[in-house]
Image (cartoon, coloured by chain):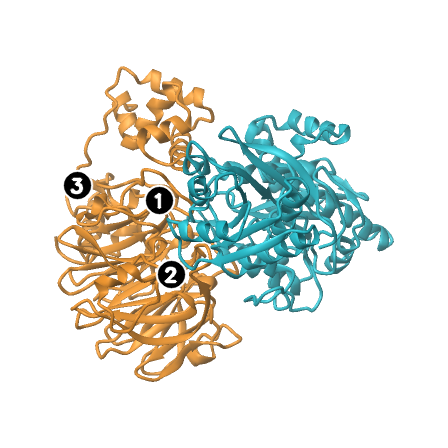
Amino acid sequence: MRAFAAVLLLGLTAVACQGAETTSSRPDIIIASDLPTSAFAPDDIVALEQAIGLAISQHSAVEGYKLAYWSLDNALGAQHSQLRGRANVRRMIANPSVLGMVGPHSSFIAAVEMPEANLAHLAMVSPTTTGSCLTVAERPCSPTAASLRPSGSNNYFRITPRDPLQGRAMANYAATKLGLRRVAAFNEIGPEGSLYVDEFAKEFALHGGTLVYQQSYDDTPDNFSAFLMQARALGADAIYGVAGVDQNACKAAAQMNGLMPGAVFLATDSITLNDDCMADLGSSPPEVWATYGYVDPRTSTEPRIKKQVDDYRKVYSKPLDTGPYVFAAYDSTRILIDAIGRAIKANDGKLPSRAQVVAAVAQTKDFVGVTGTYSFDKNGDALSPMMTIYRVNQGRWEFVQVSRLGAS
Amino acid sequence: MPPGPTQEIAVRLSPRELEVATMVAEGLTNRDIAAKLFISERTADGHLEHIREKLGVNTRAQVTAWVVRHESAPLVVPAPSPRVVVVPPGWALAHPRAWLAAALVLALLTAGVGVLRLTAPALPIIRTIAGSQCAKQVYPGGCYGGDNQRAAGAQLARPTSVAVDSRGVMYIADYGNHRIRKVVDGVITTIAGGGSGNLVDGALGISVSTRSLGYASAVAVDSHDRLYLLTSRTGVLEVWTIDTNGFMHSVVAVGSSNITISQNAPNLPVGGLAITKEGVLFIADRVGDRVMRFDGETSTYAGTGDRQGDGGAATSAQLSWPIGLALDKQENLYIADTGDNRIRRVDHAKGTITTVAGGAGEFEGNSGDDGPARNALLSFPFDVAVAPDGTIVFTDTGNHRIRSITPDGKIYAVAGTSRWGFAGDGLPASEAEFDGPEGLTLDSKGNLFIADTENQRVREIPHLFGAP
């Protein structure tokens, strides 16, 4: 089936990019994507392209206009490349049929693509970028969110929650579901990590909790005993670790075993679903709970969503085909198609300008997708993004629940 | 007469590809193959893709059938014979000795001999001299290890730049490991970086293992064999030097680099370095789209303009993410104008800038070999070096190859097939596969060293511009 999909994608791409033999087969509208297709873990990225391609193939025409897909690869030498990403956006801009793009995959790629796309009023809908600096200015950012939008208006939208909101979601769950009241936090990811902790502290306080202590590390410690002893001395019943597996977050959790017996470890998507974490946790880890800025609709019990997932699996059936962010890519594409359709209607049935498509995306109201229901704020963030809570259970990551965040 | 099975195998598949094909026939998955060969799954995918392409098949079953069909043949590729070769047009004119070969070809053709088989010269062979496969591949690639051992067995993480001093000592910007590695007589050590503390002016280099070098992405040596490195730790582009006694000294800071050590690997060098005999530094400031000059005072040397600017003052020209720099004997400066897919040249005497390669189209591409370099398409050239005869060699990074520009303005292939992957050691460089090669340098003997960045290796083409 993947081979079939590849042929389908190739076909769509060929129609879009290579030029058709006849005018009648030439697409009127192209939706492009910019993803690191040939970088590390290409299967994950190919799955995103499949999702975009499928959404487009399900809408071969929008209000009578022929629609096609153009997938661009922004990897250079196995890495996500700003150079190639920026060049790809310039290619899209040079093709007048491109009315919107899905992507990019990474926030640091978005940072170089957004100014280019913004000046051309090209709508960007990203299924995966979560860096806070792309949309808001809660901390000093370079480049700033405003400088990413040199035209002065927004053209970038995303359905995934910005990273620091993980702190809010974790605090809410810790206070309301786990009954925790006193938490100590450490942060190894710099200023962005401080925002996680700030969000955590604010939300925790709303539910009667207290952040009793916090520490930032500039380096990657192996030994967290001093921090853990301080947390214990202050009566913490949990640790919130804003750090990745490579930054020894899971080792910190393991070290709680002797120093903070019974305490809970709370974490971010820097460890969620990461199997390497299990080795670091050792044989007697504490309870581990972590957030993830994506909703996996395979966990849904809602009939409508189950049917959509089942239908998707009829086309793409391998486990990786429905891996992380696949349905976010699918939803992002459908949001863009929906907006293009509305822009055509608003333009009396004529092909809209790129700016009109941007305006239509901005006006998206309660779009019902597979991963959630979406509207956007003035910065392009989803108004009520979705977050998932996972936990470690018997050495494996286990889905717990989906949290819908309030207005962000 | 059609080739026999052994000939067909020998012609079509590399030794590694044969191994992979055989494992496919044994029913192994790409993951199994990767584990068995100690390569990444991605590399195994790449090998299989090449196998399919070479055999003209689409499925694993067809690969299996091909192996079964040839199972009676010994699955061994004959060692390449450097004395019996077909001259590839790309390499030929970039190599001084190849002019002789070209003359011989012409003579043979003139004499009505239709087969271009020669007995000399040998093609340049490529080999790995530092770096090896990691036991466990970690995003964004590479790992650290192997100090005080054979460099070819050590582990690097995304080496971005390489420099060689007059004694043959090699320095590697081990970018992903935030370290500077040194190779002497084939043995590798770490001479700086790896820690987390701030750099201190005057600190002994060896103690720098407790210090953070940040994203040290360019190394260069001056005429006194003093090592310089360009890095960013706190969002400022900085040049440091490590003297021959191992002490570190701050040289100059050149504005914002936009990259801090707390970020994940940003996947791009912060810039490049070149040094004149008199010790004047040229610093490519990628984020600032400019090249700075430092002779005790800092000034803009190229970039900051708002138009391409060929023929005009370099300071009025526009550069786009310049990275690699090199100087020729006359101290004309060559710039890898990476984001513009061009190699630029700043005339030392006039201060004017021109394009010497690339720029035929608006976007990246891969074309133009054997023709005028100005009409060629490049893909994000990262680094540049100049041979004594004025030939320019550069990494055509996005095309996974090395190309050269001869003094008459023509462009030729030097190494790489344009397919990403890792292959070709011990074979002619034209058959090598690279993965996003970024840095390169020539030593005084004409050996070319290439930072094969995503393969986590430094590779060498010996005697490219000199007699063996």
Rendered residue at 35%/44% (across/down): B417
* Residue occupying the far right of the picture: A348
Distance from disc 1 to disc 2, alpha carbons, whole Å, reads 30 Å
User: What secondary structure is found at the residue carrying circle 3?
Assistant: loop
The chain carrying label 3 is B
Asked if both marks, 1 and 2, belong to the same chain, the answer given is yes
Distance from disc 2 to disc 3, alpha carbons, whole Å, reads 40 Å
User: What secondary structure is found at the residue carrying circle 1?
Assistant: loop
Give the amino acid at mark 2: Tyr
If the image is split into quadrants, where does the N terminus of chain A sit? top right
Taking the image as shown, residue A331 lies to the left or right of residue A200, namely right
- Residue B139, horizontal then vertical, whole percent: 42, 45
Q: In front here: B284 or A32? A: B284
| In the depicted structure, whether residue A238 falls above or below residue A153 | above
In the image, which lettered chain appears orange? B
The chain carrying label 2 is B
What residue sits right under mark 2 in the picture?
Answer: B215
The chain carrying label 1 is B
What residue sits right under mark 1 in the picture?
Answer: B417
- Residue B8, horizontal then vertical, whole percent: 30, 26
Q: Earlier in the sequence, mark 2 or mark 3?
A: 3
- Residue B149, horizontal then vertical, whole percent: 17, 46
| In the depicted structure, whether residue A271 falls above or below residue A142 | above
User: What secondary structure is found at the residue carrying circle 2?
Assistant: loop
Disc marking residue B82: 3
